[in-house]
Image: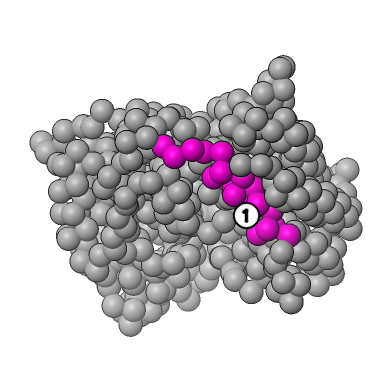
Amino acid sequence: MKVEEVPQDLKFFQGTVVSDVCYAVDADGNYQAVLSKGWDVKADALQTVLDDIDEQCEPIRQQVLRHEVSPLAYHMEKNLMDIDMLADNSGIAKRKVKKHMEYDEFMKLGADVLQTYAETLRITVDELKTVPEK
Amino acid sequence: MELDFVHKPAGHCENGVVANMLRFYGFDLPEPLIFGLAYGLFFSHMPFVKLAGLPVSSFRTFPGVLFSRVTNMLGFKTTTERFLVEENAMKALDKKLNEGVPVGCVVGMYYLPYMPIEYRFPFNGHNICIVGHDENTDLYTVSDPNCTQKVQISRKDLQKVRFTKGGTYPLFGQMYYIDKAPKQLPDLKPLVVKSLKQNAWYMTSQPSILPFFGVNGIDYLAKQMAHWEEKLGARKAALNLAQIIRMLEEIGTGGAGFRFMYGAYLQQAAQITGEDQLKEFSQRITMIGDKWRAFASDAATIFKRRKEAVTYADVAQQIAEIGKLERAFFTDLGSVAKGIKL
């Protein structure tokens, strides 16, 4: 790869201090370290994974709307966690986390437990209490 | 309190932390030199190890190996610590910082606040270096090789990322630092020659009963990839392919799965040893890297379902060709390295 070919396709790094460093060959044939803002090809790869997560979440979202599972089940999947990770990172017992996957049990939860789940999943309490409309 | 620490971004987090740390102790070695000396280039494709349901592939050596290898070679005394109690891990960090020592930490990406949210996967193997602590605001100054400048993180967040649970492997607040730097570096020439031999050996001498490692692994991946679509279905096959591209480009490889970084190393190696033939090897691995990038571009037409999409047989064929080129490359590099007189 030549220095002038280092891709600068800004997408996911927008508004952050995060950047890639690529090694590329200059006009004299010497390798240089060059900052890169991203590459469409790898952004497409990441987007494919993110789209797949959304697809996995859709049936769960439908179940929440039918009150078969709690919004917590949706947000757990959406934010890449499973029951073990959610329990370990929140400090809430696995047995309880499982119970909170039920719609009615979840609706009984107090503000502090909701706050703990929201922080563990990096979302707000308001987001946690519901699912997106589409 | 902030250490007089020069931060430079790098392709890969572990290389970058080591490079920045060594510079703090007065030894300014470029990232590719550190990567190459530690014979960091590798390939593995392990369908039986799963990360989020997808097989794990890697283009470099295993995490954590690089720091100990390079510092050992160059005559540094170092310490690595792990903790069971989170508060102790933070106290130990504060103590080293107060002694004026920059501290490398292995952290999880999931809760790292300055990362773009799309990158905050449950991946527990990121490396950062802590270089300052403000007692009043309780903010820590972080040198993260994936950032263009130093960043700050609260004590609460730092503790959380050092002990993120689940994901790839559990974290035990692992931290590492240099106890004692050498007065001067040893003669690099024998170390460079050794590194070339070792890297060639690792790539070409893996036993064929374990087809997952080194150039065998590339051949193995090519064979598997050709059948992904019929075996796994369109969705899973596309995810597998996207995952390969992410490991090749995304996780900070300097481009083409460290092949370009190794090309830069070979130029430095030519200079250190006075062996001009290593420059030709640099050109060869650059050409191989370009083929990896061409493969990535073609693969993207598949998982983005573009009209002009190529087939899995096409991309598998590209990988098979790369496998042949890398086998020849490392076989030749090994024999040339053996011939270099010290």
Judge left or right: residue B25 versus residue B115: left
Q: Circle 1: is it few (<14), some (14-19), or many (20+) Cα within 10 Å?
A: some
Q: Main secondary structure of the magenta part?
A: helix
Q: Position of residue A26 (x, y in %)?
A: 68, 20
At 56% across and 65% down in the image, what residue appears? B51
Q: Position of residue A93 (x, y in %)?
A: 29, 77
Q: Which residues are magenta?
A: B185-204
- Hey, which quadrant is residue A49 in on the image? bottom right
At 59% across and 71% down in the image, what residue appears? B49
Q: Is residue B188 magenta?
A: yes
Q: Amino acid at mark 1?
A: Gln
Q: Can you identify the residue that label 1 sits on?
A: B198
Judge left or right: residue B123 versus residue B201: left
At 76% across and 64% down in the image, what residue appears? B216
At 70% across and 67% down in the image, what residue appears? B206
Q: Is residue B313 magenta?
A: no
- Which image quarter holds the C terminus of chain B? top right
Label 1 lies in what chain? B
